[in-house]
Image: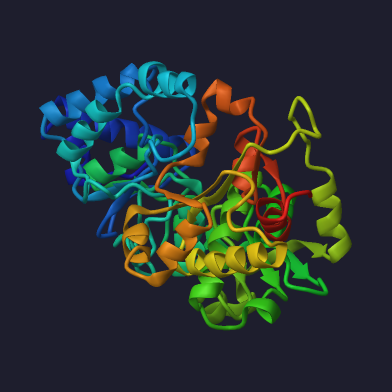
């Protein structure tokens, strides 16, 4: 790997032993992927994935103490993935004991470390940091050092920024040094599509289901999607962006997609069109039948497959302001049709603290609260990591949550029926 004089000097210890180790870590990381050089991080903010104060990750806290002690802090302010705890989310006393004493007992300590490292705001905890209400929205072409898979997919694809699917801790290393290895999705060649996906459904495909199908087919490759603009339009409206947020999260978790192009919609596809498609690209046609096949093959890992759901999580990744409003209307209408006043299953809608703050300024907040739905900033994944939560029959329309936990996937329409009318 070629290093500039400044980079080589840091590696040799010009800024101290700790910064030398940070640089060595980045160089070794780049070497592993054949990077030819390091390039500057140009995004205004960073985003870190490791947001949870798990008792068992002591080496992380030791590392943070070393960085803070040496003054090796982030060159950018940063946001974080969601917090793992919220007292407003249903949990019995034993579950709360496990959460607070045995799992996330270091949360306050860790958040204090994050403040010293460069946390942009004490409430900047969300996996959807790119939403307007959060304030960490990269610009087209900016180079980032992020790791959260759903956020990486969104900023690469919908915003046109450039970021590899880094691992946790590597994200802060790039931000401290101000450089990241140049390979993969940072390069023009690495952003070319090696799959052409033809969407030939008779109705608008479920975002999380379509993303799941594509992710499992292409894995870490870049797909160029044709036909989706028929359902989303050719403008990146709030509705289209919310759809792509959920779609991209499913491609990233059910596969390992870090970038996708949607013909006539996402910025690079609009600008470069089919020149983004690499020679010899493979093809995958998605029909109603194909989506049904994917759905039918999801494993059900509840001990009792016929159990009555005890909890519903919506918002993984976190919901947008428009989604909270739309779901308020949906829940109210469905409850009225069923002759019910409140949801029949404890239901949690998750969103960024900034989004929740804006939502609470609208009439929708009181309306949604009246239905019994809880709005929370929690990370559903972190909640489900509790072994007692993992044994619960939890339902969701998030394919990310389905993939990483025991939660059972249903489409948005099926979820709405279950929480407002009962049955499946």
Residue 261, x across and y down, in percent? 59, 68
Q: How many marks?
A: 0
Q: Is residue 6 left or right of residue 166?
A: left
User: Is 187 located above or below residue 228 in the figure?
Assistant: above
- Which quarter shows the N terminus? top left
Residue 185, x across and y down, in percent? 49, 55
* Of residues 257 and 107, the one drawn nearer to the viewer in this rendering: 107
Residue drawn 47% across and 65% down? 367
Task: Name which quarter of the figure residue 365 lies in.
Answer: bottom left
Q: Is residue 106 left or right of residue 326?
A: left
* Of residues 107 and 331, the one drawn nearer to the viewer in this rendering: 331
Residue 335, x across and y down, in percent? 64, 62
Colour scheme: rainbow
Residue drawn 77% across and 69% down? 198
* Of residues 230 and 63, the one drawn nearer to the viewer in this rendering: 230
Residue 86, x across and y down, in percent? 38, 38
Residue lying farthest to the right in this orientation:
289
Does residue 106 appear anywhere in the picture?
yes
User: Is 422 located above or below residue 361 in the figure?
Assistant: above
Does residue 21 appear anywhere in the picture?
no
Residue drawn 49% across and 36% down? 90
Q: Is residue 280 left or right of residue 324?
A: right
Task: Name which quarter of the figure residue 214 lies in.
Answer: bottom right
């Amino acid at each position: 790997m070629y290093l500039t004089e400044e980079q080589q000097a840091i590696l040799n210890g010009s800024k101290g032993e700790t910064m030398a180790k940070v640089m060595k870590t980045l160089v070794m990381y780049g070497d592993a992927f054949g990077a030819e050089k390091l390039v500057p991080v140009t995004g205004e903010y960073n985003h870190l994935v490791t947001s949870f104060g798990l008792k068992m990750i002591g080496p992380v806290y030791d590392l943070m103490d070393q960085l803070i002690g040496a003054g090796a802090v982030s060159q950018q302010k940063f946001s974080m993935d969601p917090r793992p705890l919220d007292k407003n989310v249903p949990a019995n006393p034993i579950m709360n004991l496990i959460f607070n004493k045995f799992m996330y007992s270091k949360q306050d300590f860790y958040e204090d470390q994050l403040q010293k490292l460069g946390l942009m705001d004490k409430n900047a905890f969300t996996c959807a940091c790119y939403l307007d209400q959060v304030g960490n929205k990269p610009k087209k072409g900016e180079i980032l050092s992020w790791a959260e898979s759903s956020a990486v997919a969104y900023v690469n694809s919908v915003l046109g920024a450039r970021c590899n699917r880094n691992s946790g801790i590597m994200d802060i290393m790039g931000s401290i040094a101000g450089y990241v290895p140049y390979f993969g999705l940072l390069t023009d060649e690495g952003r070319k599509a090696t799959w052409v996906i033809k969407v030939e459904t008779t109705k608008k495909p479920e975002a999380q289901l379509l993303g799941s199908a594509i992710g499992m087919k292409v894995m870490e490759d870049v797909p160029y999607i044709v036909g989706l603009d028929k359902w989303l339009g050719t403008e990146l409206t709030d509705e289209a962006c919310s759809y792509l947020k959920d779609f991209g999260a499913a491609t990233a978790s059910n596969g390992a997609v870090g970038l996708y192009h949607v013909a006539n919609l996402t910025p690079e596809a609009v600008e470069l069109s089919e020149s983004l498609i690499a020679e010899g690209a493979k093809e995958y046609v998605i029909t109603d039948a194909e989506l049904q096949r994917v759905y039918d093959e999801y494993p059900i890992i509840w001990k009792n497959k016929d159990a009555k759901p005890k909890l519903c999580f919506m918002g993984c990744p976190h919901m947008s302001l428009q989604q909270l409003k739309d779901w308020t209307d949906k829940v109210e209408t469905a409850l009225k049709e069923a002759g019910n006043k409140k949801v029949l299953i404890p239901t949690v809608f998750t969103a960024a603290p900034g989004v929740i703050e804006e939502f609470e300024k609208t009439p929708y907040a009181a309306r949604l609260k009246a239905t019994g739905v809880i709005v929370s900033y929690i990370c559903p994944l972190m909640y489900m990591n509790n072994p007692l939560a993992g044994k619960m029959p939890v339902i969701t329309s998030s394919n990310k949550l389905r993939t990483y936990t025991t939660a059972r996937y249903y489409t948005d329409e099926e979820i709405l029926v279950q929480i407002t009318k009962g049955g499946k």
